[in-house]
Amino acid sequence: METVPHNILEGRKDQVHRNRQQPFNMVCEKHSLAGSVSQRACVFCGSRVVLYPIADALHLIHGPAGCAAYTWDIRGALSSGPQLHRLSFTTDLRERDIIFGGEKKLYHALIELIDQFQPKAAFVYATCIVGVIGDDVDAVCKRVQEEKNIPALPVHSEGFKGTKKDGYKAACDAMARLVGTGDTAGIGPLSLNIMGDFNIAGETWLIKRYYEQMGLQVVASFTGDGRIDDLRRAHGAALNVVQCSGSMIHLAKDMKQRYGIPFIHVSYFGIEDMSRALYEVAEFFQDETILTRTQELVRDEISRIMPELNRYREKLTGKRACVYTGGAFKAFSLVRSLRTLGVQTVVVGSQTGSKDDYDMLRRLCDEGTILVDDTNPVELSRFVQEKGADLLIGGVKERPIAYKLGLGFCDHNHERKQILAGYEGMVNFAKEVYSSVCSPVWKLVPRRRAGSEACAEAVEPAPLSAARKVS
Amino acid sequence: MGKPKVKTKPVSVTDGCRHATRNPCRLCTPFGACMVFHGISGCVPFIHGSQGCATYIRRYLIGHYREPVDIACSNFSEPSTVFGGKQNLETGLTNVAAQYHPEMIGICTTCLAETIGDDVPMFLHEIKKQHPELPGLVHVATPSYCGTHTDGFNRAVRSVIEALAQSGVKHKGVNLFSGMLSPADLRYLKEIMTDFELSTMMLPDYSDSFDGVVWGQYEKNIEHGTALAGIAKAAGACASIEFRSTASSKDSAGGYLLKRFGTPYYGMPIPISVKDTDRFLSVVSQLSGRVPPDKYDGERGRLIDAYVDGHKYVFEKRAVVYGEEDLVVALASFLSEIGIIPALCASGGHSGRLRDALAEQIPEMMPDVTVLEDTDFWDIAAAAKDARPDLIVGNSNGYKLKRELGIPLIRVGLPIHDRIGASRILHVGYRGAQQLYDRIVNALIEQQQEESPIGYTHI
């Protein structure tokens, strides 16, 4: 095997772990090292992604235009009705506003936009600069709320105030102010809230359909295809079902404390986790009919998709994957889903995993698998080469790393346009992996990694010119 | 999924004072600066500010170019915001040096760093003294509330020249400051300069870093771009050529070289129309002392031949054009030349010079042209309805408008997030105009063909 120098920065060495080849003492949940090209974003990004799918709310970004421009209609979060979330609003602060303060502009912008779009609520995101110039966003929101008679909710998402995870919390804090303000009439005991699914390509609709098939009432979705009025009455549900590692946990805890609503953690990715989620929810309600219906649902769905999955499994068995996700919870499911397809995970990491998450990954993965927290392109490139990965699963930022190095790629982030959750999603996932890993184009790519056999046998083409200089 | 259903009360463009921006038509200043630094050989772009700034910009650039783009960041935390970002800057720079071994680090500041009052030039001076092993450090101030990505781009070019160009031996080479063009444009410009046998320092040159080949091995993707040695000799060049219609003269690199070193300066619009390319080539011809090679007569001749073949399809069609101000001016000039009325010319830029620059380029058209400066896509959409357009020329952010109006969108500029091949779109020179022309004419023909109940197979 080719030796590749790893070039891991001194300050990051304890954020990398080689499974069962060294004592486990993974360091994580720390601020990204300056100068390391972290794949993480910021607090604002965390808040923005969580609240984004709420389709009948106004999302006003208080800051210069950039933060709004970069987040305009970038996600695949669908709405069955209003599409207000797909527009991008900003106070577009200028030098003058920085000097004299932006409160007045914020006030007028809010009034103007509420009059124009008639939203059910307004979220006001404070960006870095607002935290520095000291605008009293809370006071402006309070005034607007009184004048316009809709909730105007400050989201304290100043970019520098932590990591993306702190942004999740800021979003949860804002939503917590909505929960409990609506009428819970008509909500029965067999009811739940879906938390931490964002309706990418319609996934929330699929999950909702499963629950309804089981005989359960879905009260609110946080936040996929979300609606303000649903969130306001969410405290009437009997159970919170929380997906995603970090994004909704604060709100679930808050609702448990304030309203005594228990919560369970689930994942909807992969056959194993999807089925486990449905069974755990069914068991919670201790209802024979629900349990029976759940068994039927799971049996029907699995028997429906297995023949197709097996076809992909035949093609994919023996392949190796690198998984790099935002939250680690999704990584668990991906390791399992890949295993279902005969694919071994040789590198796995996340932007925001906790020590417990990595401990779970450690137990889930094989010996020698590299676990990595908050990695950067230089490290990731070297890891996939060393391990001879055939596939990288991540977001758009990771895609060019994979493609340049001749690896297949699967987008498992919020920008994708196809369902990867649920049983149907598992088939899509298998197809996605297959169509990337087994494409004939790789035959033309000079894959110089050792130890891999792509379905398309790697062929070293005769170079037209002298060999390219390598670093 | 159907068209976006958004319940609104109509707001007229002329409603007077507007406080909110709806769907911005520009990006922030550090974005442009990062593009420039990515186009310098051995240089790593570095953002002094929050992690999100670097990540959002990377994501946007990767979505457009589909190439790896590494942008480092000092990654501000709450303490650095309160006590200043020097420590983070120092750690960040030493880490970038350790991981990338660059020849230069290009540092741009965000609104956060600028506003808390970080004296970055002084920090860099002190850091360099403490760490003499660090590579060259070039700083550009890019608070995002001052200007647009275009301003950030121009300021970065100027800062690099100010920092690196030294008075020295005069030489026959030329400086080319092309502005924010595509990799295909930069490649073609280099071809032209080579054909005229002019040694050229083009800054930036991201033709390879934003449009590279597939790798066999991991690369840092900082190897390509303008050579630092060439930048150092810029003052001694026989001339600077700068494509500039609206950009502020205080951000002009060519202007700086003229003023500081007396390097002759030629400013001109981005050459897309025949008129503008003729002008560019005549300057190049004059500087090189060579007549244009036959190849260019051929390209020009074929272009005009195509103009003739297609003139009826385009005559008095009406276009909505938006994007960076200089690009809008150049496109409007090209459209006018082929008989299309650039009925709405819009930009999120706020140089205040767009209207004048258009009036200079297309005086005869101005009575028919609506100009929107410092605007957003909400107002562009509203004005577009009044403009009765037949086509849209601009980046992919106009897709929703295209869908609403049911007319073709000719994708140019940046961003193009809904197609592949953004790097390969050629805009400049006779060849660029030829490609744009063919795309425009064919889009209009296709529209006509699709709308026809007959389904003609010969048009």
Image (cartoon, rainbow, N blue to C red):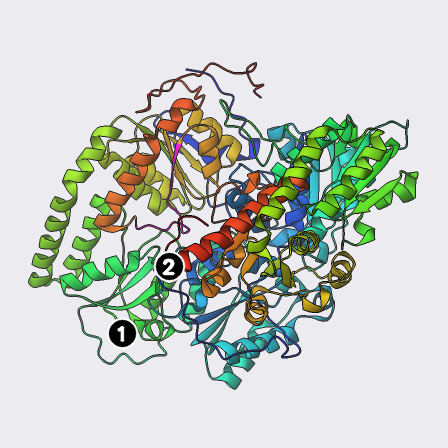
Residue with the mark numbered 1: A236
Query: Residue beneath label 2, please?
Result: A248
Q: Judge by depth and name the residue closer to the eye, B38 or B25.
A: B25
**Closest to the observer, A89 or A444:** A444
- Mark closest to the chain's N terminus, 2 or 1: 1
Q: Chain of mark 2?
A: A
Categorize mark 2 by other alpha carbons within 10 Å: few (<14), some (14-19), many (20+). many
Range of residues picked out in magenta: A408-419
Q: Are marks 2 and 1 in contact (CB under 8 Å)?
A: no
**Quarter location, residue A81:** bottom left
Q: Secondary structure at mark 2?
A: loop
Q: Residue at x 53, y 36 (%)?
A: B68
Q: Amino acid at mark 2?
A: Met
Is residue A365 visible in this depiction of the protein? yes
Q: Which x, y percent locates residue A409?
A: 39, 36
Left or right position of B252 against B456: right
Identify which amino acid the numbered label 1 is placed on. Gly
Magenta-span inclusion, residue B243: no
Residue A428 sits above or below residue A380 on the image: below
- Residue A409 part of the magenta segment: yes
